[in-house]
Image (cartoon, rainbow, N blue to C red):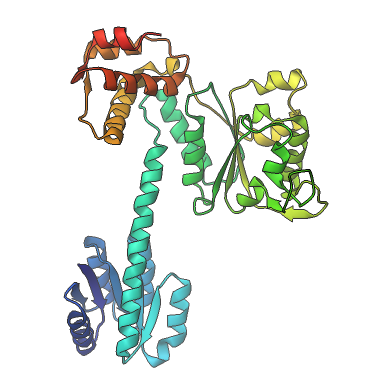
Amino acid sequence: MAKILIIEDEAAIRRVLTKILSEESKDYQVEEAGDGLEGINKIREEDYDLVLCDIKMPKMDGVEVLEAARKLKPEVPMVMISGHGDLDTAVNTMRLGAFDYISKPPDLNRLLNTVRNALDRKTLVVENIKLKKKVSKKYEMVGESEEIGQIKAMIEKVAPTDARVLITGPNGTGKELVAHWLHEKSERSKGPLVEVNCAAIPSELIESELFGHVKGAFTSANKDRAGKFEAANGGTIFLDEIGDMSLSAQAKVLRALQESRVQRVGSDKDIKVDVRVVAATNKNLKQEIADGNFREDLYHRLAVILIKVPALNDRRNDIPILIAHFAKKISQEQGTALKTFSSKAIDLLKAYDWTGNIRELRNVVERLIILSGAEVTEGDVKLFASK
């Protein structure tokens, strides 16, 4: 059932709107507020699917209600009700985030169409929010150790800026999680996050992958193709394992960072891009610079902010929390009952040498859940989790 709030100081107009909406659908539950202050208090306390709000009202006018409601419940569509003299203001409210406006006296068809469209939009917004929460849960950072707390605090400070970030740490520690949270908490979160695994792309193809190419640039270039930098325009590009990038590609990335422009392979035309760069590596880039494998100028461009993700062996107190997290997640994925781990099993897992870090721990937890009984015991760990 759709819950609709009408904020209108003229009782006669409130009654008419309530009657029209109630007769239109039994699925509409309509509530009323006699002024802007009462309306905003209701919005604060209740969850509405749509708000119809007059512009000229005592205590709080419609513009003030709109601005306050957008802060309290930004997902709720607001339709403004305007008198003839309020049309300019009504149009301005659209710029402030109103879904639409209707004039007094309301045209029946226009009113009902606007209400239906606004409710449809609310449904889409809620679905997108749920989807985003699912995506965020996929990249949840689990742990209560001091090391993880420091990373989370750093993300909170750095994410809202456009500063470039270099994430370091061994394989399997979750560097990609840090990259996703930097994007999710940034002003670019509505834009794309484009991931590039530099180690997985052959050196002869990395430039085409990053910057695109024009038709005929090389044998298999049958048509023009945009690169990852163009795809990430307005958002974030995550260059994973950047230490494996060729020197030639490094030079082009450096130019892209310096000038905010790229050139497709085979073209001399500049394409302007607005991209935040987050990079990650498991290598010691300073040693790679000394060995002649990585450009020092590119390193300093990338490493404005350094975030080091610790090995699992350096945050063993998080292992029980991670085991519980993975056990719950795996049981949900497999549709099976949640299995518990005995305290001795957890202590044994805490003492392991996790060279594969969190990725390895997750695999071991999954193996134990599949092969063990209702409770994972110390014996199960010794039998099934042996290296």
Q: How many numbered circles are shown? A: 0
Relative horizontal placement of residue 22, taking residue 323 as reference (left or right): left
Residue 247 at x, y percent in the picture: 76, 30
Quarter holding the N terminus is bottom left
Residue shown at the point (49%, 40%) measured from the top left: 180
**Residue 245 found in image quarter:** top right
**Residue 135 found in image quarter:** top left
In this view of the protein, can residue 185 be seen by the observer?
no
Residue furthest right in the image: 268
Residue closest to the eye, 232 or 71: 232
Relative horizontal placement of residue 63, taking residue 2 as reference (left or right): right
Quarter holding the C terminus is top left
Residue 9 at x, y percent in the picture: 25, 83
In this view of the protein, can residue 16 be seen by the observer?
yes
Relative horizontal placement of residue 279, taking residue 287 as reference (left or right): left
Relative horizontal placement of residue 81, taking residue 154 as reference (left or right): left
Residue closest to the eye, 177 or 159: 177
Residue shown at the point (28%, 14%) measured from the top left: 346
Residue 120 at x, y percent in the picture: 34, 69
Where 70 falls versus 31 (above or below)? above
**Residue 118 found in image quarter:** bottom left
